[in-house]
Image (spheres, rainbow, N blue to C red):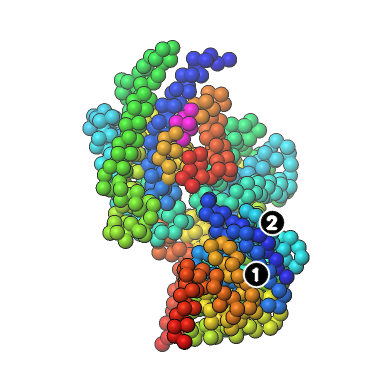
Amino acid sequence: MYSPTIILEALVNGLMLGAVYALIALGLTLIYGVLHIVNFAHGALLTVSMYLVWIGCEYFGLDPYVAILFVTPAMFAIGYFLQRLVIGPASRGSDNGILLVTLGLSIVIQNLLLAGFNSDTRTIVTDYAFGVIPLGPLLLSQPRVIGLAVSVVTAGLLWLVLNRTDIGKAIRAVAKEKLGASLVGIDVAHVYAMTFAIGTACLAIAGGLLMPSFYVSPTTGAAFVLVAFTIVVLGGMGSIPGALIGGLLIGVVEAASSLFLGDSLGQIGIFLIFILVLLFKPTGLFGAR
Amino acid sequence: MKKAELLCALAFLIVLGLLALVGLPGNILNLFIFMMIITLTAQGWNLLGGYGGLSSFGHAAFFGTGAYAMTVLQTSFGINAWVALVCGVALGALVGAFIGFLSFRAGLKGSYFALITLAFAEVLRILANSWDFTGGAAGMMIKLQNGFAYLQFSDRRYFFLILLVFVALALFLSRWLERSAFGAYLIALRENDQAAQALGVDIFRVKMQAITLSAGLTALAGCLYAQNFLFIDANVAYGSWISIEALFAAIVGGAGTLIGPLIGAVLLLGLGEVTKSFSGGIAGLDLVVFGIILVLCVAFAPNGIRGFFANLKRRRSAAAEAA
Amino acid sequence: MLKAQNLTKRFSGLLAVDNASIEVQQGSITGLIGPNGAGKTTLFAMIAGFLPPNGGSVTFEGEDITQEKPHLRARRGLARTFQIVQPFAGLNVRDNIAVGAYLHTKDPDEAKRQASLTAEKVGLGRELDKLASGLTIAGRKRLELARALATRPKLLLLDEVLAGLNPSEIRDVLPIIRQIRDEGVTILMIEHIMQAVMNLCDTVHVLSQGKMIASGEPRIVCNDPAVIEAYLGHGAAERIRSEGKANA
């Protein structure tokens, strides 16, 4: 009933959407891997970055991809200060405390956006939103091709930052052995905040990649947060390659289940994977332990 | 002191009931009804998340099951409202036992438990949103029929009084729990599950009992919610808003305390009304206030408002002793 | 009363306990000693059911309990304390101990009464209403002991209950342990403080690098060259003997 071309096209488009998912999950898994916290505010912060991109386009006439250049440092700063001034001090390091603080934050952010922008969905009109790139028999969505390319480049950059820079080395040291790192003079609170900032900055890029083909409303991020958690858990909490592969996989699963089950039931596939992985392999497919 | 806490709460409920009987403006009565439904939901959450330390982010799964059972059984099967209520509670408890069995068997706790409960609630929401017998995305209505047998009243005060009775019963349930061996075991496994096992506590069994009880109570709140508004859809019944309100009320009021959920629900919804009236109808600001209060609570009053005052009292008596 | 045979535990390549056997006679105080990292606590965890062994068996009062969960062993009368104390921090001393007492009574008033009595016995009688998190180290060690006692064990596994105490506190706790035995509770204890081992134990087993290297009366075991070498390094026994001769 479906021609192979339609199925293949859906899968390839899913794969490309998965690349953007992977970028979102990358930020989340980095934060988990270093701070060992489940950042519930990640979805709400994605919404913030999408609104910032939208503002850039609507009021300053920027192209969404150009807006990324401005939104990324803004999100970096937001992430840094959020961790340094709110999450760190308020949660006092307890697992439950952090979970609740980030949940509280996500609700504050989501509803501030609701109060500021009301619940209308906002979109950006670009001339390439519906553009397609032909590849053999397949027609690929242009924004998604760009999404895939930028996500891969960003993941590469992140790898370079973690492995080739001083702050990257400090981050890896803190992730492995917090006490030891602080004993050799690394400022752990600063490294935590930097990690959180980098994780949040990933969202700025993801937001810019999503906006041309997606819309934003105050609850948009909430839809992504469970998807991102699924990817992170699937890939193994804290594992960066795991997040990449997990993201691609989930993109494909979503595309396949939307195709076969319809849009409203489509998301169920992701949640079922999430539940099954948590129940049977909580360390994930590529878990460190 | 614990007894005084119970008496205080009961007195408060009686005052609310008397106020309603003397006469309240309709919108205030509606607010009170909503407060009591949230209280009941939070009391359910508190049994597991407060006493047992297993914070669920997905109590909507139980609330929604109660609400849908109530609606579907009455509307599609013509079953009596009270029978539907009992079935709703039982079904909610069953869903709780199912989720608990899988999660606790896998040894999930902390953030993992929070996330998996959220995922279960979302699965149920999506299912209810797409299945025909739950009315799909259009939702479902309960037929308007007044009378005690239908659990619907032309005078809404009676519904409120029945709600107050349920909240009081839940208070007695919590009180029983605080004084029982089961409660002691539940609190013990929250504080340290290894030590509890060493002392002969079957932690799997205790957690199973706790989640079943907790889910049943929250399902009861869902049943009453459906019966009050006579309309539900998937985003209301299984929406994350109710999971979050339950958690907020219990934690802000004082998780693992008898009257915490009541204090929290009354305070949060009261404050929500105040914010709404000041903000001139801008949607969302009341929830912003909720969120900020939650963060402040975690930072400065980890045991909620109830714990905050208990601490003050303890400190004052210690100071008096020292003097 | 307790018989652990050929217990083995591997942690991804590291052999923590290697074919170790230990037997505890009813009514005795049996010591388990050995250098740091010898695998004593791992052995304890296998006996109490907190770690599944890779090989070997545990029998208690003639029944094989190797596969049994910890809480079931506790119900049989096998109680343990933890080397790193594990109090229910948010509860007061009475409620902490009562959790143990609930194993025998479902009545809260009775459980609390028993808890007070047990607290009295270990010298916590004056701190019943204190939060466990507010106790000193010595207090927490006593609390560990009291909680385990409240389950009315037949066999009590004590994992370094004296560690971290000062000499006068140790002097206070020794008679308590002896009294527990005199009331009919068999005791198996891990201990580093030799004064206590010499003082209390009828039999001592020595674990080194996961292997049981000696057992017998404390005085004899402590002069065993293999034991001295395990503690002080290869050749130490020889050196001590020759120094002893030189001094004589």
Which residue is at 38% across, 36% downward? A23
Q: Find residue A94 and report its horizontal and vertical position in percent.
A: 44, 59
B251 is higher (above) or lower (below) than B64: below
C114 is higher (above) or lower (below) than B54: below
In-front residue for pair A49/B206: B206
Q: Find residue C160 and report its horizontal and vertical position in percent.
A: 54, 73
Determine the residue located farthest toward the left in the rendered image: A60
Dot 2 surroundings within 10 Å: few (below 14), some, or many (20 or more)? few
- Label 2 amino acid? Gln
B45 is higher (above) or lower (below) than B84: below
Considering the whole magenta stretch, tell me its main secondary structure: helix
Q: Find residue B263 and report its horizontal and vertical position in percent.
A: 51, 62
Using the numbered discs, state the Cα–Cα distance from disc 1 to disc 2 in whole angstroms.
17 Å
Which residue is at 68% across, 66% downward? C74
The residue pinned by badge 1 equals: C79
- Label 1 amino acid? Ala
Which residue is at 65% across, 69% downward? C79
Determine the residue located farthest toward the right in the rendered image: C62
C73 is higher (above) or lower (below) than B132: below
Q: Quadrant of the N terminus of chain A?
A: top right
Return the disc, 1 or 2, that comes first in the chain's sequence. Answer: 2
Tell me whether circle 1 and circle 2 mark residues in contact (CB < 8 Å). no
Q: Quadrant of residue C227?
A: bottom right
Determine whether the residue tagged by mark 2 lies in a helix, strand or loop.
Answer: loop
Chain to which mark 2 belongs:
C
The residue pinned by badge 2 equals: C67
Residue A248 forms part of the magenta stretch: yes
Q: Which mark is residue B28?
A: none
In-front residue for pair C2/A245: C2
Residue B19 forms part of the magenta stretch: no
Residue B94 shows in the view: yes
Magenta stretch in the rendered image: A246-252
